[in-house]
Image (tube, rainbow, N blue to C red):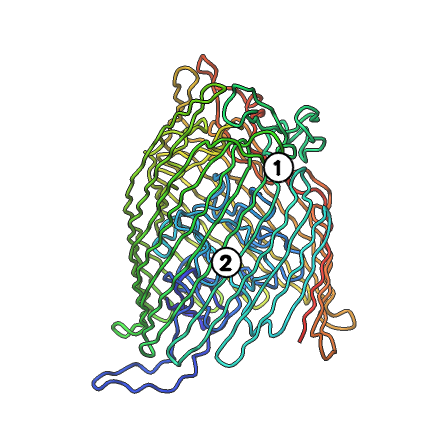
Amino acid sequence: MLATDPSPATAQTALPPVTVDAPREARAKPAKRKPAGRTLAARPRVTPPTAAIPTVLVQRDVTPTIARDGLNQAPSGQTQTTVDRSQFDNRPAFSVGDVLRESPGISIKQGNGPRDVGISIRGSNARNGFGIRNLLIFEDGFPVTQPDGLSRSDLIDPHAYGAIDVIRGPSSALYGNYATGGALNFRTRPGGTIDGVEYGIDGGSFGYLNNYLAAGKKVGNFEGSLFASDVRGDGYISNSWFNTQTVNFLGTLQATPDDRFTVKFINNDLDARLPIRLSLNQYNQNPFQRGCLTGATAAQGCATVPLFNNGFNTAAGTDRETALQAGLGRNDRRTIVGGRWEHDFDNQTTWRNQFVFDDRNINQPTGATSAIGDFPSYNYMSDITRRGEILGMDSTTYFGGWYNTLTASSDTRNVMPGGNATLGALSSNLYSDTSNYGVRAREELKLNPSLTAIAGIGWETTNLKGRNTAFTYTGPTPITTTTVTTADRQFQNTAPEFALLYRLNSEWQFRGRVATGYGTPQVSNLFVLPNGQNGNNTGLQAQKNLGYDLGFDWTPNSALRFSATGFYEFFKDELVTQATPVGSPNASYTFNAPRSEHRGVELAADWRFYPGWRLTAAYTYLDEIYTEYIENITNGAVFGFNRAGNKIPGISPNELTARLSYDQLSGPLRGLGAFVELQWKDSFYMDNANLLKAPGYELINLNVHYGTELVSDYFRSVNLYFEVRNVFDRTYVASANNIADTVTAAGIQNPASVLANTTGSIYAGAPRTFVAGMKLAFK
């Protein structure tokens, strides 16, 4: 949809919002003959950006975005930060987590794989056991979140992108299902910006090596860019080596003065070994799992997983094996193909159609069981955007609809002794069918030169169908018993939104917003019990949140930008996930917390206080509590505990990323620079009873870099950098999944000393790491 910022920085948008710091040039097109009796306002042609969702005003937080022809987007009146390439182009960004920490509201935790990180906006995904949930992810306006709400970051190599837009707060009026926390839009570098070929290589500690290539050009009416990378390493934890290849292509053709076609292609192949998540005590004893060759000879603190010797039951006994001994890991492929057609009916009206095919193929022996399946999905959207006037006020009107679906049959098989993730008998089969369809409308009205009002609404129906067949085997010569659980659920959700954006003057901008979000369960959530066994959990409800935002942006001069946002969100039936006992068929269990509240503050600053010097900071304060929740825990009898007033586990109350940098701007050392970076994450609770805490940490990173233009017929420039991460070699928790509280037979909650032995939760972060890199640009 079109963006109507009162400032000259105006962008037009549709899908994932993206801000622009410069006005978009009007397309050069021959004048069109007006129909008789019809008058069009004399204004430059505005083309809708590349997305499938409405968008509005550009609300800039701290960092400017990179304007790109045909790909400008910006959500209106919404809290948003754009992290541009200047903030990570001179460093070896291993995963997207290294980049997104530059935005307030963002929290990162290590996922199940080297570049698989959990991304959370305002705590939205901090309670999820794996992958990314409760927010939507796009690349250049194409959805990278599948219809079941699951995203993975394995396919994201930061070297490919020119900017990343972080949209914070409930956003279902714009993005539909699962946007309770917000959205991310990754923008690849346009071909005209690359204008040639770039080759880069990063290498460092623990066998890390990344070879990558970027090529792009703008020729006539066509602009295309291609990125490819090969990344591998041994990992810093036992059994955590990885090998992954990524290809990413974006091409845009201006076929006629009124028609534009865009094609997107992503393919990622991942082969990785995976360690077992630890208890807090195991983490304290042996965080990197040294001396964990076999279960029989394992050193103190080594994590193990129980495997059926016969592959189907305990009749032949079980063997406790380490991750290395069992061969646990992931072998996944992800392929995304998308196309978009934009047609201008006239200078004010644009029609857009977009189709995406997204196939996720997994083979994941990550514990006592292995998940195997293929998950193809289809996503279609169509919308119309019109820009004109209402009663003399500039108006942008948007209306669109969408449909997406995912149907799959996946198996869970037992892992048995033998190494290399030897598979035993079938544990369960899940048939799942997820579909979403709906419509959305949005109006942006510029009430006067300083004040803009935005109102939007989205309506959506979600259908979840599933059939879970669980297999149990009795006796040494097994007698097979099957238990079938079915679900057929329909959810209808409506999400209104209203926002005001007021620009007092060139220095001050104020914003207020009230918006709603919703997210339905995943089909697989409906068939997992608290103990991790297969069963009936089909009563799960959709979560909903109502959020209020108030904030301001202060830009007194070109050297200083400061942004502050306060938010308060009320959740109903919040979906919370916690780890299940190691050895159970399923790794996590999901439940509804009837009522909870999320509130916090987000601060961002960018201060160029002296030539060459720059200070940036992103700070987030979160206070998230249950306000209504009775937790039932079974040990013989069922015991209920009131969790009202308790902190929601997994939420760090304070997070800060700050960087002080210097770059030489002139003279013989021009291009030489360095920075020191601080990352602080506060301690947080791991359980609903608030008995056990994961420790916080502070990390210091140092970077030295040098970039210069080259006088050559073949080479354009060279960039060199060297970085020391975790300079003081701190041992810290990079990920801690929520754990379940337990009780004695008398109904007394077990203390923290007992919970500290609960496995399946913690991954340690990387120790001191050295990484060097080089990037060479060819003409």
**Number of on-image labels:** 2
Q: Is residue 383 visible?
A: yes
Disc 2 element: strand
In the rendered view, tell whether residue 770 sits above or below residue 265. above
Looking at the image, the residue that sits furthest to the right is 668
Q: Position of residue 129 (x, y in %)?
A: 50, 38
Q: In terms of image quadrants, where is residue 306?
A: top right
Q: Position of residue 483 (x, y in %)?
A: 36, 28
Say which of marks 1 and 2 sits in front. 1
> Label 1 neighbourhood size at 10 Å, few (<14), some (14-19), many (20+)?
some
The image quadrant where one finds the N terminus is: bottom left
Residue located farthest toward the left when viewing the structure as drawn: 37
Q: Amino acid at mark 1?
A: Asn
Q: Measured from the top left, where is residue 128 in percent x and y?
A: 48, 40
Q: Which residue carries the number 1 mark?
A: 420
Vertical order, 248 against 622 (above or below): below
Establish if 389 lies above or below 164: below
